[in-house]
Image (cartoon, helix red, strand yellow):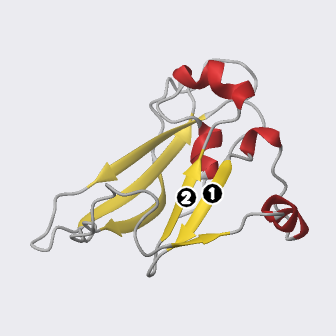
Amino acid sequence: SVPLVLPKRGGVQVQVVVGEADDAGRRGVEVYGRPEPEDLDGDAGDGGEGAWTLHARGRLAPAEVSGGESLTVWPPTGAREVPLDGVYEHLEELGYAYGPAFRGLRRAWLGEGEVFAEVALPEALRAEAGRYLLHPALLDAA
């Protein structure tokens, strides 16, 4: 397989192929790519009929489902709250700069091998939230 290189102009078609499950539920997965039908000169390319190039190959496995407790109590029983004072400033010192849209972490708790969090979309972004199944800034905060 070879790296998938994005052109300076134009696009790349991507195809993900997932194989049949084996006895353990694992499946092969392959990622292919080819240039968009239009080439860099703006002339008609190959109509998207060029050969697909293999860029990645791997295996998918079913997730292990635990019989975890239902979160009917919030915050979770036995979890201890983590103070968040200065968390974004500390992350910035580590090289992670979060602008106002991505500062949605409100509260967090640690359980036994688990982290629980309350996140909220900043008020300025709430009007556009309906455009997404899950707003990217909210996902990032989580």
Q: Are marks 2 and 1 in contact (CB under 8 Å)?
A: yes
What residue sits right under mark 2 in the picture?
117
Dot 1 amino acid type:
Arg
Circle on res. 135: none
Q: Residue most toward the right?
A: 93
Locate residue 7 relative to residue 107 in the image: left or right.
Answer: right
63 and 90: which is toward the camera: 90
Determine the image quadrant of residue 117: bottom right
Q: Residue most toward the bottom?
A: 112
- In the rendered image, residue 84, in percent from the top left (x then y), is placed at 73, 64
86 and 17: which is toward the camera: 86
- Residue at figure coordinates x 74%, y 26% from the top left: 124
Neighbours of disc 1 within 10 Å: few (<14), some (14-19), many (20+): some
- Residue at figure coordinates x 60%, y 42% from the top left: 138
Say what secondary structure mark 1 lies in.
Answer: strand
Q: Earlier in the sequence, mark 2 or mark 1?
A: 1
- Residue at figure coordinates x 81%, y 61% from the top left: 96
- Residue at figure coordinates x 64%, y 36% from the top left: 121
Dot 2 amino acid type:
Ala
Q: CA–CA distance between discs 2 and 1?
A: 6 Å
Neighbours of disc 2 within 10 Å: few (<14), some (14-19), many (20+): some
Q: Is residue 10 visible?
A: yes
Determine the image quadrant of residue 89: bottom right
68 and 61: which is toward the camera: 68
Q: From this view, report whether residue 69 is shown above or below residue 44.
A: below
- In the rendered image, residue 51, in percent from the top left (x then y), is placed at 45, 43
Circle on res. 107: 1
Q: From this view, report whether residue 22 is shown above or below residue 3.
A: below
Q: Is residue 39 visible?
A: no
- In the rendered image, residue 37, in percent from the top left (x then y), is placed at 56, 26
